[in-house]
Amino acid sequence: MALMDFIKKQFIDVIQWTEEGDGMLAMRYPMRDFEIQYGAQLTVRESQMAVFVDEGQIADVFGPGLYTLTTRTLPLLTNLKNWDKLFQSPFKSDVYFFSTRLQLDCKWGTPNPITIRDKDFGMVRMRAFGIYSYKLTDARRFHSEISGTREQYTVADLDGQLRNLVISSMTDLFGESGVPFIDMAANQDELGKALKGKLEPVFDRYGLALDSFVVQNVSLPEELQKILDTRIGMNMIGDLGRYTQYQVATSIPLAAQNEGGIAGIGAGLGAGMGIGQAMTAAMAQTTPAAAAPMAAPAAADEVVATLEKLHALVAKGILSQAEFDAKKADLLGKLV
């Protein structure tokens, strides 16, 4: 009797899994000849689930707890198998463990720009990236749809598939929403929430629950970003004519300090006025309230010539600096 008890104890298996490191989603418990003895002890820890598979069929799913594998704890398997006596019919089965912990800091991004139709810029190519987190909630579905009979299935194995799902959903969302790129970039939190809502059913199909989804950056390719920066700069300048006049007025005192300085900027001043006038005229064709035309280059040349003569008189002591400054202000005022 004592010998029989000893022999029976040798058939009792202890089945458990302790995760080593991060990134493991599923693993098949290693067993010799795929035999699990009747009465084996199955330990499922918190943040785990276990699936009992017999001859390719899922017989049961276990949440956290300690289980003794018998006909009572495996009712479905009991209907499929007939045991006459203890230990005569061990389970020819597999046990798969699944991690239900949150998988954090999963990165997503567009490896290549995606093309969308934008209200402001027409067809544009844009990039985006961010992070998300998820966890396994349905071990039966994940086993059937994803991991199957593999000995191990990791976060890295699933990463590419999930990233492609994110990019596909993001492209669809942008196309459906019609939200301009500028508004997307300014409301990244709302964009992340919208993408999370669109992706949740996709993750659920695989037995996963999307916990969070964050958009960290939305941007245009470098060449398009330069065009956007130029457009922003033009809006900040506003009245191009007055901006040109301001540049001229601030450059004359600096040039007057150097011999021949005013003469050197004469041609540039006339050219600058001409460019400003041309750009102002072009803007007047598209803008209802266009600025008034600027002085002709010839008038600017006359002002510069007069200032040169007056500056020479200051150098000879005929005019004071105050008189020169007053006359300069009067002449520049006539250009406005």
Image: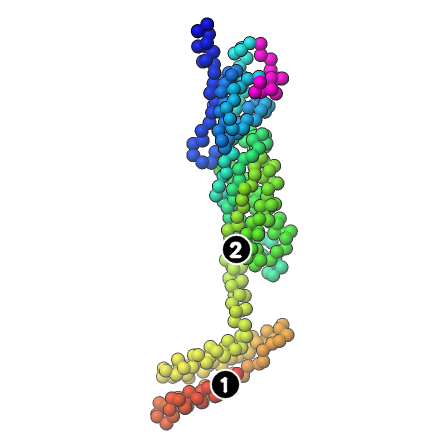
Residue 270 spot, x, y in % from top left = 49, 81
Alpha carbon of mark 2 to alpha carbon of mark 1: how far?
A: 45 Å
| Residue that sits furthest to the top in the current view | 1
Give neighbour class at mark 1: few <14, some 14-19, many 20+ (Cα, 10 Å). Answer: few
* Residue segment shown in magenta: 72-84
Residue located at (46% from left, 79% from top):
248
Horizontal relation, residue 254 to residue 152: left or right: left
Question: Is residue 144 visible to the viewer in this orientation of the structure?
Answer: yes
Residue located at (54% from left, 72% from top):
238
Residue 56 in which image quadrant: top right
Residue 333: mark: 1
- The residue closer to the viewer here, 263 or 246, is 246
Q: Where is 286 relative to 25, above or below?
A: below
- The residue closer to the viewer here, 117 or 95, is 95
Residue 151 spot, x, y in % from top left = 50, 27
- First of labels 2, 1 by sequence position: 2
Question: Is residue 301 visible to the viewer in this orientation of the structure?
Answer: no
| Residue that sits furthest to the left in the current view | 316
Residue with the mark numbered 2: 219
**Contact, mark 2 vs mark 1 (Cβ under 8 Å):** no
Residue 87 spot, x, y in % from top left = 52, 11
Amino acid type of the residue tagged 2 in the rendering? Ser
Residue located at (64% from left, 51% from top):
176
> Mark 2 falls on what kind of element?
strand
Residue 122 in which image quadrant: bottom right
Q: Is-magenta flag for residue 76?
A: yes
Horizontal relation, residue 52 to residue 247: left or right: right
Amino acid type of the residue tagged 1 in the rendering? Gly
Give neighbour class at mark 2: few <14, some 14-19, many 20+ (Cα, 10 Å). Answer: some
